[in-house]
Image: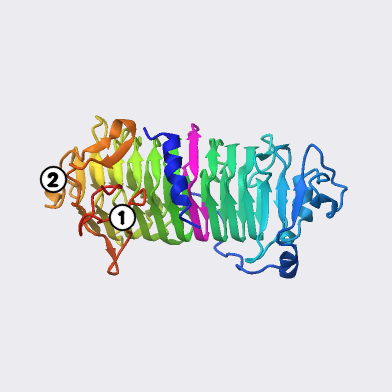
Amino acid sequence: MITKSAFFAVALALTGLLSGCTKETGSASVAPVDTVPAKATAAATAGQLFYVSGATGNDSRTATQAQNPATPWKTIQKGVSSLPGGATLVISGGIYTEKVVVPASANGTAQAPTVIRSKQGETATLDGQNTGSQWEGLWQLKNNQYITLKGLKAQNGFWYGFSGESSGNILIDSCSTVNTRASGIYVKTTSNLTIRRNNVRKACQEPGRDASGNGAQECITVAAVQNFTIVGNEVWDNPVVGEGGEGIDAKAGSTNGEITQNYVHDLVELGIYVDAGSRESHTIRVHANRIINCAGGLFVAGELGGTALDIYFYNNLVVNGTSSGFQFQSTGNGRFVNIYVVNNTFYNNGQKGFAGDVSNFSKNTTNSNLVIRNNIFYNKTANYRYSIWHDLAAPHVISNNLFFDFKPSNNGTNSFTSSNLTGADLLIDPLFANATSGDFTLKPTSPAINKGAVILLSGTPLFTTDLIGKPRGANGTRWDMGAYEN
């Protein structure tokens, strides 16, 4: 298996190059990006530091006193409520039994964002003690602009760890959550959002739906969010089977997003999910992620009849999923248009139930351009049912894939059998470097080298590098199959 240390060595290096539930939630409206009531104040206070310490603080102190680390405020809520826009709140490590709501008065600007962070080398932890109310986050943003949360922790939340709503220009960076009944991080109706380098563990511990049919959402959820990046996070250790708990989900009309370099592992639900809900989710790239030991790998859906449009899954590694490596969901009969599943490596998925490497259960006759190319499907398990199964054959473009071993679906007139294979498909061992130790790069003698097609979008390559940033096609005009370029 891929070691945690090895993954983060790669993830951090790549990050340095960068600057579900069927119940739909949230409104499609998004707060204006630049509605900040106190720009002058933010500019004037940029760079100023204010301090909080649960051990030595006193909330009766003035803001001037709280700028001295020797005379801090005591509670985080006092700190954020008194914080001028554009300033930085430095919170000493320790356990704080609070639920913190960041007010709009703390909003920053593009020139001077407001930062709320743990003291360097320490961790400020909100402990919800498993009490509270539904929809409540331990760290809450609402109607906020230009806010950075960094190095903070949420644990034992009755519902969410970090939550955001109707906000813009939000960065949640290097934070952690553990043991939340719903999502570790949940953001809706927001624009310009980055969720980066966080650790989300034991999220979605609520096993059932409430009386209104609401579930616990997903470990990291974005709903009706425009312009988002979810990068370099670790999501793991969810043993609870319930109504929710998928690793990462972009849903409910989320658009213009990127889900990349995340390590999702050891979940009883699937790894990464794009769900349009009842709306249109479009222009989302899901790439360079590792999904290991989850119920399933990559899924796409329109669970309430919506449309998933221009969704690109590439350079991902999916290993040991109990259900299918990739799945087009049928729930709600959503529509799929321009879905690309290309240059991924799938290893021993579909180990339980009616599942295999790729499953398309959709019966929507308006689906179009479902592209499955350049993938490596390695499956030597006894229980997987098929390599590819689809209910509707017409909209698929399937070629340039490597199957080892190939298993036909044989389930009706639209079954995918050996007669559907093309001359560009391979039925042979891909020769991974060392799959038993989690190294799925290709040996120099691999038959997958230079056997992939160059994937173009409007005449331009859809992507130019592999899972670890190596250039595609460096050894010739053709690409290699799978997530790794030799």
Neighbours of disc 2 within 10 Å: few (<14), some (14-19), many (20+): few
Q: Is residue 354 magenta?
A: no
Q: Are marks 2 and 1 in contact (CB under 8 Å)?
A: no
Number of marks drawn:
2
- Report the amino acid beneath label 2: Ser
Marks 2 and 1, how far apart at CA: 32 Å
| Numbered mark located on residue 412 in the image | none
Percent of width and height locating residue 170: 60, 57
Q: Is residue 178 visible?
A: yes
* Residue at image location 57% in from the left, 46% down from the top: 174
Q: Position of residue 145 (x, y in %)?
A: 65, 62
Counting residues from the N terminus, which is met first, the one under dot 2 or under dot 1?
2
In front: mark 2 or mark 1?
1
**Label 1 residue SS:** loop
Comparing 229 with 18, the one in front is 18
Q: Is 313 on the left-hand or right-hand side of 280?
A: left
Looking at the image, is 77 positioned above or below residue 365? Answer: above
Whether residue 268 is visible to the viewer of this picture, yes or no, is no
Packing grade of label 1 (10 A; few <14, some 14-19, many >=20) is some
Which residue corresponds to the image point at 26% horizontal and 60% vertical from the top-left?
455
Vertical position of residue 2 compared to residue 119: above or below: above
| Quadrant of image for the N terminus | top left
Circle on res. 471: 1
Of 31 and 193, the residue lying toward us: 193
The residue pinned by badge 2 equals 418
Q: Position of residue 102 (x, y in %)?
A: 71, 54
Q: Which residue is at a point 57% across and 43% down the rendered structure image?
A: 184
Residue visible at 49% across and 40% down in the picture: 235
Left or right: 401 in relation to 191: left
Q: Which residues are magenta?
A: 222-247
Give the left or right position of residue 65, taking residue 246 as reference: right
Q: Quadrant of residue 471?
A: bottom left
